[in-house]
Amino acid sequence: MKTALMVLSCILTVPSAFAARSVEEFKTSAGALKITTVMHAGFVIEAGGQVVIVDPAQGSWDGVPQADLILITDIHGDHLNQSMIAKVKKPNGAVIAPEAVVKTVTDAQILRNGESKTIGAWKIEALPMYNLKRGPSEGKLYHDKGRGNGYIVTYGGLRIYIAGDTEGIPEMRALKNIDVAFVPMNLPYTMTPEEAADAVKAFHPKVVYPYHYMGSEPKAFEAALAGSGIDVRIRNWY
């Protein structure tokens, strides 16, 4: 059953290099859930005494609590950093990743597009993420369908969509009942802020964070969603 989101987000103080980051708190049926931005595509989810880290690849991860679970979306270096995974993972922590990542992170658990896995109180669903038209050359795409994963992470009824590197694909536009979404917007690799806003309007999350936006203007994304009723939260990821 879906739960109501906390109306106000909180900017908390944490005693470490982690402290400078934005921390958002949401209510779930299983208690409070916190999301902390780190850099680019990397962030931390905390709830129920457990830590989930998404794409620990860029920036400083000093002071970040060690992860019970790490989610990797793709093979590119701004999402996959083997030494950083080793730094932030608990000794008994798990890594979930698409099959292409397992060539680098050999102990990762493979989750393919369309598959799901439940680990403790967390349900992880793997979704497609891919380019529709953009690539390095004619006939090539930056992200081929099936290689990488977007994810829906569900905890206490709260559904968090992590888009990964993607354009506004049909699978994104068809999503239902998303509470919190993280959507990329940077060229040439994903899409423009306006294209991202158009896709977000289609599935209408309650809250959306522009992320993975280096070189783009998230304010343009916010402007394109004005009047939609979607809560756009721009945070400093760089």
Image (cartoon, rainbow, N blue to C red):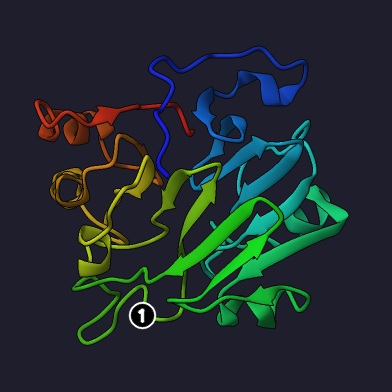
Q: At which x and y percent is residue 1?
A: 42, 45
Quadrant of the rendered image containing residue 207: top left
Return the x and y of residue 131 as percentages of the image width and height: 27, 71
- Camera-side residue: 142 or 90? 90
The residue that mark 1 highlights is 144
Judge whether 83 appears above or below 47 on screen.
Answer: below
For badge 1, the amino acid type reads: Asp
Rate crowding at label 1 as few (under 14), some (14 to 19) or many (20 or more) other CA atoms within 10 Å. some
Q: Residue at x 31, y 48 (%)?
A: 177
The reply to whether residue 57 is visible in this rendering is: no
Residue 201 visible in this rendered orientation of the protein: yes
* Residue at the bottom extreme, as displayed: 139
Quick one: 58 or 23, which is closer to the camera?
A: 23
Q: Nearer the viewer, residue 90 or 217?
A: 90
Where is residue 52 shown, x and y percent of the image? 66, 47
The answer to whether 102 is drawn above or below residue 162 in the figure is below
Against 16, residue 103 (above or below) is below
For the point 38% across and 56% down, which residue is it? 163
Q: Residue at position x 37%, y 40% from top?
A: 179
Mark 1 residue element: loop
Residue 111 on image: x %, y %: 57, 75
Between residue 47 and residue 143, name the one nearer to us: 47
Q: Residue at the location (52% across, 67% down)?
A: 76
State left or right for residue 57 relative to residue 207. right
